[in-house]
Amino acid sequence: MNRFAAMIFVFSLLAGLASSGTALESKVLMVTEKTLSVDLGPSYEILGSKLNTSDKGMTSQDFIINDTASSGSAFLSVMSVYDAVMGRLSPSVISEIFLTGGLAGVQERGDKVIGNWTATSGLGENVAVHVLSSNDSRIESVGGKYDVMVWNLGNSNYIVMTSLLDKNNTTQVIKTLTIN
C-alpha cells in the first residue's frame, strides 16, 4: 500500500471514530409521582383525578378537598408548565395569566368579583385571593360566595384553586399545601 493510500485510510478511520463519538441530545419530559399534602383537620379528605396532558405545554391534575363534617370544599388544579415560551415568563406573570383566564370565564357566566384579601404561601409569597359572588344555586346554598386564587409552588408548578371553605381554612390550604 502506498503512503498516500495509508494516510487516506487513517484519516477515514479517525473521521469515522470521531463522528461515532458525537452524542445527539434532546429534551425529554419525565412525569414523576409526587405527594400532595395539606394540613387541615381530621374531617377533611382529598380526592384526586387522573393526570391531564396536552400538547399545549402544560399538564394538570385536579383534586377536591372536602370537609366531611360541613358543606365546605375546595377545587384544586395542579398545573405544571413545560412550554419553552411560557417557561421564560416569571412565575408571577404565569400566575396572572391563569388567574385572568379563570376570572374571565366565571365573569362570563355572571359571577362578580366583590372583594379580595391576601394570604401567604408556604414559600412566603403573597397570594391574592379574589372573592366572587354567584347566582349559581349550588354556591348560593353555601352563602353565594367563593374564593379564587393562583399561586406558584416553586419551579414550574402552580395551584389554581376555587374555595368554598371559610377564610381560615382557605388560608391554611395556601399556607401549608406542598408537593414533595
Image: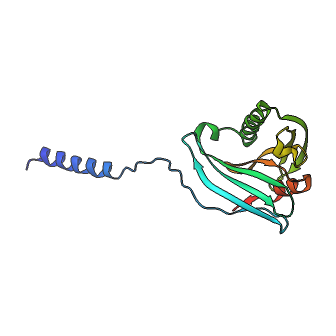
Find residue 85 and report its image quarter. Answer: top right
In the displayed orientation, state which residue is furthest to the left: 1
Report the number of discs: 0
Instruction: Determine whether, in the image, residue 137 is placed left or right of residue 115.
Output: left
Residue 27 in view, yes or no? yes
Q: Is residue 168 left or right of residue 36?
A: right
Q: Residue drawn at (50%, 48%), measured in percent from left and top?
A: 27
Q: In front here: 25 or 79?
A: 79
Q: Position of residue 105 (x, y in %)?
A: 74, 34
Return the x and y of residue 159 as percentages of the image width and height.
Answer: 73, 49
For this view, does 25 lie left or right of residue 114? left
Looking at this view, name the residue that lies furthest to the bottom: 42
Depth check: give the residue in front, 122 or 3: 122
**Residue in the image at 23% along x and 47% along y:** 11
Q: Is residue 33 left or right of residue 165?
A: left
Task: For the C terminus, give its image quadrant.
Answer: bottom right
**Residue drawn 86% across and 39% down?**
132
Place of residue 35 in the rendered image (x, y in percent of width and height, measured from the top left): 68, 63
Indicate the colouring scheme: rainbow
- Residue 68 location, x and y as percent? 82, 63
- Residue 128 visible somewhere in the drawing: no
Q: Residue at x 44, y 48 (%)?
A: 25
